[in-house]
């Protein structure tokens, strides 16, 4: 049972209702994260706005999802691990073993994805004050300053979601359960 109630299109505060309805239409179900964030219209608006901005970043969808999965693993957010594992498995058609490795915070063997994962871990661990070596290694993998900042953008988005889920403790939606840690397998 969540510690903070999950709002619906009917119960959400007026300022949250349009965003709740949009999330429902986009997903075909209402992710419990949205129901949770709907309690604070500004938090839900921030999530939806920053998600849209993050989607326009120069990092590929796979790279952006590596950031999200790495942050969720680091922050201990099973809800986000399930949600982002579903995305990488369904939308990216990644091999299930790679999806599982990402969910577990393990290297994948893909040099570029692993560089994003390593750099994301460094950004989180150092609160952005990565070492010169960490930044150089990220750039040596073919990334640039813009993309380093886009990792920070992705971490900021993930932090909002991960921390909100950790605070509210919503259940993982049935639609995402097959991708939950401990359930999802290669």
Image (cartoon, rainbow, N blue to C red):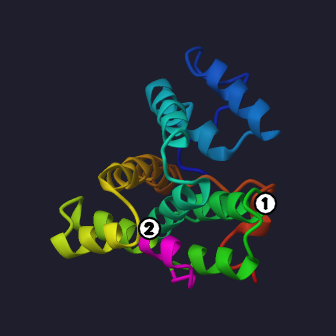
Q: Is residue 185 above or below residue 76?
A: below
Instruction: Give the crowd class for mark 1: few <14, some 14-19, many >=20 residues within 10 Å.
Output: few
Q: Is residue 170 above or below residue 35?
A: below
Instruction: Give the crowd class for mark 2: few <14, some 14-19, many >=20 residues within 10 Å.
Output: many
The residue wearing badge 2 is: 116
The residue wearing badge 1 is: 90
Which label lies toward us, 2 or 1?
Answer: 2
Asked whether 87 falls inside the magenta stretch, the response is: no
Quadrant location of the N terminus in the rendered image: bottom right
Quadrant location of the C terminus in the rendered image: bottom right
Q: Nearer the viewer, residue 86 or 41?
A: 86
Asked whether 115 falls inside the magenta stretch, the response is: yes
Label 1 residue SS: helix
Left or right: where 140 falls relative to 171: left
Left or right: where 172 falls relative to 136: right
Sequence-earlier tag: 2 or 1? 1
- Magenta part of the chain: 106-116
Checking the image for residue 71, the label placed there is none
On the image, the x and y values in percent for residue 40 come to 48, 29
Q: Nearer the viewer, residue 90 or 15?
A: 90
């Amino acid at each position: 049972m969540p510690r903070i109630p999950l709002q619906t299109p009917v119960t959400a505060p007026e300022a949250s209702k349009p965003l709740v309805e949009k999330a429902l239409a986009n997903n075909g179900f209402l992710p419990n994260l949205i129901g949770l964030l709907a309690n604070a219209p500004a938090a839900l608006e921030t999530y939806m706005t920053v998600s849209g901005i993050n989607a326009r970043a120069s990092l590929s969808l796979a790279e952006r999802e590596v950031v999200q999965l790495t942050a969720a693993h680091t922050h201990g957010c099973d809800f986000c691990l399930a949600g982002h594992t579903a995305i990488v498995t369904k939308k990216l058609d990644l091999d299930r073993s790679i999806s599982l490795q990402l969910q577990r915070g393990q290297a994948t063997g893909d040099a570029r994805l692993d560089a994003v994962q390593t750099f994301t871990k460094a950004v989180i661990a150092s609160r952005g004050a990565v070492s010169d070596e960490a930044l150089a290694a990220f750039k040596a993998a073919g990334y640039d300053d813009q993309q380093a900042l886009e990792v920070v953008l992705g971490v900021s988005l993930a932090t909002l979601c991960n921390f909100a889920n950790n605070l509210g403790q919503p259940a993982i939606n049935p639609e995402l359960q097959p991708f939950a840690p401990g359930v999802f397998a290669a």
